[in-house]
Image (spheres, coloured by chain):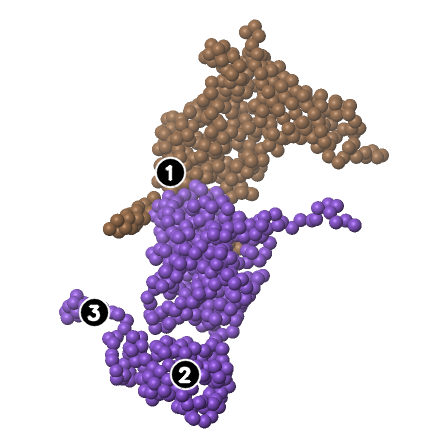
Amino acid sequence: MKKFCLVSLLIAVTLLPACWDRTEAERLGVVHVVALDKSPAIPRGVKVTVQVINTRGITAGGGGGGGGGGGGIQPGLTPFVNLETSGSTLFEAFRNLSQTSPRRLFFFHTRAVVVSEELARDHGLGKVLDFLDRNVQIRRTVWLLVARSADIKNILNTLPQFEPTVGQTINRIISERSLSTRYAPERVLDFMRCLQVEGGDPFTAGLRLVGSNRNLRLENTAVFRRDRLAGWLNSRETRGLLWIRGRVKGGPITIPCGQGGSFVSTEIKKTFTSVKPEIRNNQIIMHVSIRIRSDLTETQCPAAFDPETYHMLEQKQNRVIKSEIQAAVTKLQDLKSDALCFGEAIHRRYPGRWKVMKGRWHDLFPSVQVVIKVQSKIGQSGLVQSPAKIKNR
Amino acid sequence: MSFFKRLINKPKKKFTGETAAGSTPLQYGKPYSSDDIKAVGISSDLEENYNNIKSILGHSVDIIMRKFKLGASNQVEAFLLYVDDFVDLELVSDNVLTPLVTVKVEPKTGNLLKHLMNEAITLGEININTDLHLTLQEVLYGNVALFVDGEDSALSISAKKFPHRPVADSVIEPVVRGPREAFTEILAINTAMVRRRMKDPNFVIESIVLGKRTKTSLAILYFKGIVDPDLVSEVKHRLNNIEIDGVLESHYLEELIQDSPFSPFPQIGNTERPDRVVSALLQGRVAILTDGTPFALWVPARLGDLLQSPEDYYQGYMVATVLRWLRFLAFGLSVVLPSLYIAITTFHQEMIPPTLLISIISFREGVPFPAFVEALIMEVTFEALREAGIRLPRPVGQAVSIVGALVLGQAAISAKLVSPLMVIVVAITGIASFMVPAYTLGLAFRLMRFPLMILAASLGLFGIMGGIILLLIHLTSLRSFGAPYMAPLGPTYTYEFKDTLVRAPWWAMTTRPSMGRANWRRQPRNKKPEPPPAGGDTQ
């Protein structure tokens, strides 16, 4: 009897649930990019555009016999479909998408959330982030990017050459970011963490279309004052920001050498940053010290490569880095955005004084003095010592 | 109606297997129990014996009863009884008939049969029986019986010769390197093959007879001094408890002596390789050879033992270890792969890498069935193909492989009945399940796949987890002749890991597994081959 009960219980457990929450893979619409903009119709509403993979537009391997032979994309079908709705809340808007989508939208594989510059400036990202935080499907490790409102539609309609979708393209580009270190993308997770600490403002990279081919390009950095967009840093200032945040992992440094117009390039190999606050006579001084090791990768100067030259180059490299950092600090102090997280450093060092300061930190921040110290070492120059001499020029 | 009535009022006759004892006179065509025959006995009247035997054996055409006159002078009536083609006729003619016809028979020289046995017959295995039943039994095993007028006993002479297959290569457990020969259907040849590998006097082959009708001989093999004596008596006890009509294959016994009769998992190992039997005996196991089948049984057999191949010991230990791990992996895959595929593609798509998900979606585009049905179709097809592959007559083999590979594989995909990924999954599962060296174990786990697939389709990964937990609970509760089935993992015997999780080199395997605890140390330690100590024997 006991056995019978057990067996019937087992059968009931297996058969009664009857696959109620089953979704076959082909019923899913895999979303790769979510774009958020101000809704033109609903005041303070959000316009949501999602890019859904259209698997019929991607011939995977060669399963289908009907598609064209060689081409990766079947004629007449795009590899993705963009769906668009609006709503007063994001959740409402996302659910309204099901009115247009025959497939259940699947956000687990979302690669990037693109927020329009206008939404970020006028509404702030607070409500967007709350939704991204609560939503189970959109992972918090997704990249958050800022684009101009006018660009968003075009960005989503770009037909990327290498990857099947825009989302994939963005993701792959970002994964190679330390080759240039000219833009500073942030994951939703880090962006939110930055908002939750007191002294520090978030930033993230911008997304644009460039050139006549309208290629996607990640460039510059959008800096925020709390959750609102404050302004943009150019690529030089972005590098400066990343120096102070200790997030430079690679990328080129261009050093002018001797005669006008000639340059030497080095590649960043290893960096170390320390930021130490000091309060002297009510003046906040930040001591930023950077140690860097780089390799020589290119030279346009015919100078012989002896230790003195190296030493000279190192001094010049120090100046370049220093000027990048200085530019970033000046710009951020202008924008009153503490993307450098100086506040946090002060909070740690002087927790008592911070309590007094934190209320008016955004007003104090522009008056912070920054002392920059750079120590650099240029190492290997490859197998080539001195540059090739071109005779009888 | 009357049919149902008959069903309800089933006659409650007790089936004894024997018919009621009939007393003399013996009738032709009537079944006789052993007691009947014993009651008849051997008469001193030759003619009566002749007629009795004729009646008992039912005038079978293969029973030869050759009447002749014994002795050169003072001739005495006698007859030989044997089964046609069971005896070596040449041997009988040279060593029995000829001397018997020419022997000098003195009238009333004490025991005539003893005299013949000592003076006339020149064969080794010979004895005097007073019991008719025993005599007939021996005749049916292939002996020749001699009945002499005036004697109330008979001579039983062994001159066996069976029609049999020669020793051939192992078909079920082939190896690349290692002995090739496999057992045959003849018990005596099989025991000889084992004995040839073990010349120790402590190696014991005991015999018992099972099967009320077939009277099949079994041999119980063990190694005195290594084996646990309790295990031997347990094996004998279980075998002696068997009451069955016939034993045609060792599996008949397996089902009657295994510890958990309701489990799909084999708790007794079987092999057709003499070397595997010897290795089992040396580990302290007991082997049972059955006449009429090349498959020997060995007990106790645990899950880990069934995952080992004899070839593990015939090649380098590093290779063998890696192959063993590969086998573990394949073993796991063969159980869970299809259900994992179902669960992940229908419930947990977020676990699939993005690019793979896209290809799964595009492959499944247009497939009308849910993944579970798709998997079921393919699995059933695969099982059917496998079964057909074994059963089919050789000449049509090619037809089936064409149908299987082309029609069912390629065409099913083109027709969008199944997705190519599912075919890959089923193919991997199939290959993996064939990697399990014990065929019976592979079958059992192949069976387990289907309930797991149902669980996966209804409860997702949660269901698979539950299924695996139930499976593990069952496996850990099993025993094989008292040995825990999951040992050395279930109860952890760390000293057995060296020959379960890995295959340690021979110089490191110095102790026997748990069933050989009676004589635990197999060989001395520190026998690793090493160069001689420096400066040792330089000249």
| Real-space CA distance between mark 3 and mark 2, rounded to the nearest whole angstrom | 48 Å
Residue B63 seen in this snapshot: yes
Q: Which chain is brown?
A: A
The answer to whether residue A171 is left or right of residue A324 is left
Question: What amino acid is labelled 2 in the image?
Answer: Asn
- Of residues B172 and B368, the one nearer the viewer is B172
Q: Which mark is residue A242?
A: none
State how many labels appear.
3
User: Helix, strand, or loop for circle 2?
Assistant: loop
Earlier in the chain: of badge 3 and badge 2, it is 3
Task: Report if the CB atoms under discs 1 and 2 are less than 8 Å apart.
Answer: no
Nearer to us of marks 1 and 2 is: 2
Q: Residues within 10 Å of mark 3 (few under 14, many from 20)?
A: few
Q: Are marks 1 and 3 on the same chain?
A: no
Residue at which label 1 appears: A97
Q: Residue at x 43, y 38 (%)?
A: A108
Residue at which label 2 appears: B111
Q: Which mark is residue B13?
A: 3
| Real-space CA distance between mark 1 and mark 3, rounded to the nearest whole angstrom | 77 Å
User: Helix, strand, or loop for circle 1?
Assistant: helix
Chain for disc number 3: B
Question: What amino acid is labelled 3 in the image?
Answer: Lys
Looking at the image, is B401 positioned above or below residue B501? below
Q: Residue at x 52, y 23 (%)?
A: A223
Q: Residue at x 37, y 72 (%)?
A: B215
Which tint is chain B? purple
Residue B236 in the image: state x and y as whole percent: 39, 61
